[in-house]
Amino acid sequence: MEYKTLTSLSANLPADFKPSYNELKTSLMALADPRRQTANKRYPLWSMLLAVVAALLSQQLSLVAAAEWLAAQSETT
């Protein structure tokens, strides 16, 4: 599997690039879910990735910080 870094991705974007929530959600929904097909998949992959993007945009720059920030959010925020 080939991975791209944020630096290589952002180098191709215009300076005024501001995707909408719906554009981001649609892009994330198009990704294939590499997890096994089990009943343990509580959340869709796109929703977990969208939550991580929100945490990163809120300056939560470590996995622990992101997890704590996400746990503190309510479903209405």
Image: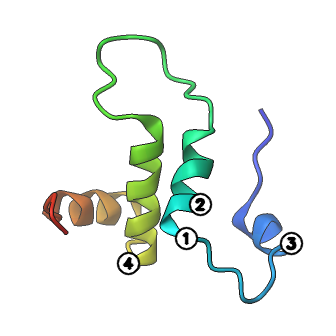
Sequence-wise, the earlier of marks 3 and 1 is 3
Query: Does the residue at mark 2 contact the one at mark 1 (Cβ under 8 Å)?
Result: yes
Q: How far apart are marks 2 and 4 (CA)?
A: 19 Å
The residue wearing badge 1 is: 20
The residue lying furthest to the top in this view is: 38
The residue wearing badge 4 is: 58
Secondary element at tag 1 = loop
Query: Does the residue at mark 2 contact the one at mark 4 (Cβ under 8 Å)?
Result: no
The residue wearing badge 2 is: 23
Q: How far apart are marks 3 and 2 (CA)?
A: 17 Å
Sequence-wise, the earlier of marks 3 and 2 is 3
Secondary element at tag 3 = loop
Q: How far apart are marks 2 and 1 (CA)?
A: 5 Å
Q: How far apart are marks 1 and 4 (CA)?
A: 17 Å
Residue type at numbered disc 4: Ser
Viewer-nearest residue: 64 or 17: 17
Sequence-wise, the earlier of marks 4 and 3 is 3
Q: Distance between the residues labelled 4 and 3?
A: 23 Å
Q: Determine whether 17 is above or below 5 in the image.
A: below
Query: Does the residue at mark 3 contact the one at mark 1 (Cβ under 8 Å)?
Result: no
Q: Determine whether 5 is above or below 18 in the image.
A: above
Task: Find residue 17 and report its horizontal and vertical position in percent.
Answer: 70, 80
